Image: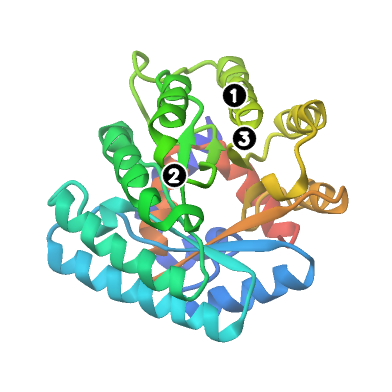
Amino acid sequence: MINKLIANTLPYMPKKAVWILSKRYVAGKGIADAISVVKRLNKRGIKASVDLLGEFISNMDEAEKNMHQYIEIISELAKHDVDCNLSLKPTSFGLLIDSAKCYSLIRQVLAYASLKEKFVRIDMEDSQCTSLEIDLYLKLKEEFQENVGLVVQAYLKRTYNDLSDMLLQAHSVTTPLNLRICKGIYIEPAYLAYKDFHQVRHHFLEDLDLMLKNGIYAAIATHDPFLVCESFELIRRYGVPKEKYEFQMLYGVAPSLRNKIADSGHNLRVYVPFGKDWFGYCSRRIKENPKMVNDIVKALFVRG
């Protein structure tokens, strides 16, 4: 109840106050802030993925602007020679306005990223985008092979079938699918998404099992200690080599679990969001998942 109250009042609080809550899991407003965080993570032996905050846009001029910003980000990452890839949201490139133009813009980002040897992860958004983003990924993968990946969400009831379908459709590519599996955070109706905590856990592991035994590169994104331990067991069961999977976590969240994973010798990547839209991002994410308030409060006292 307290978490929900805090989450619902955040959009009406002064930005300076919200920043106190947010600065532990948002790198800052500019790419320099993000690179500084990435360098610290790299020194700890942890990989990173940066994401420019900002999702839904109202016109394609904004999409063009985002494309150029991503080109600049890639250039800066390459200049600093950090172990870091990128995440992008197709709605920021006009997916729901002009899907053909969206593809063209993201393709330009992928082409430049490939030139600079940088990997790009296409984020999964709410259910209105799911099929569009799967199609987008498969189309881009035909050209860019190992330089592009996608996110899937375990709480969606369609995900297991989506994984099976992608395995069938990806027969024309020469490199394995690269998929990030997470629980899912968007608010969806019960006929589309599992609501029970234990059900979501079960389907997360069922999806991960399918991925690992079919040679899909698995980016295992979770802060749930139970899922981490069960993932360790699946990796052991299938004898998955280190270069075929990694764990992923949000910057600033559950640092003790993060250190446990890294110290156990597993590849770990931390998602590092940054950008001028940090206020909107934090307000939306916390409102969508009030339980994050606990992690944020912890992160205020335990530097992540």
Whether residue 30 is visible: no
Nearer to us of marks 1 and 2 is: 2
At 13% from the left edge and 52% from the top edge, which residue is drawn? 98
Q: Position of residue 94 (x, y in %)?
A: 20, 55
Q: Is residue 49 left or right of residue 134?
A: right
Q: Position of residue 34 (x, y in %)?
A: 55, 73
Q: Which residue is mark 1?
A: 210
At 51% from the left edge and 27% from the top edge, which residue is drawn? 154
Q: Earlier in the sequence, mark 1 or mark 2?
A: 2
Tell me the distance, in whole angstroms, between the alpha carbons under discs 2 and 3.
13 Å
Classify the position of the C terminus by image quarter. bottom right
Query: Pointers 1 and 2 in contact (CB under 8 A)?
Result: no
* In the foreground, 304 or 70: 70
Residue type at numbered disc 1: Leu
| Farthest right residue in view | 264
Whether 219 is drawn above or below 262: the answer is above
At 42% from the left edge and 27% from the top edge, which residue is drawn? 168
Query: Pointers 2 and 3 in contact (CB under 8 A)?
Result: no
Question: Which mark is on residue 173?
Answer: 2
Q: Position of residue 146 (x, y in %)?
A: 51, 54
Disc 3 secondary structure class: loop
Nearer to us of marks 1 and 3 is: 3
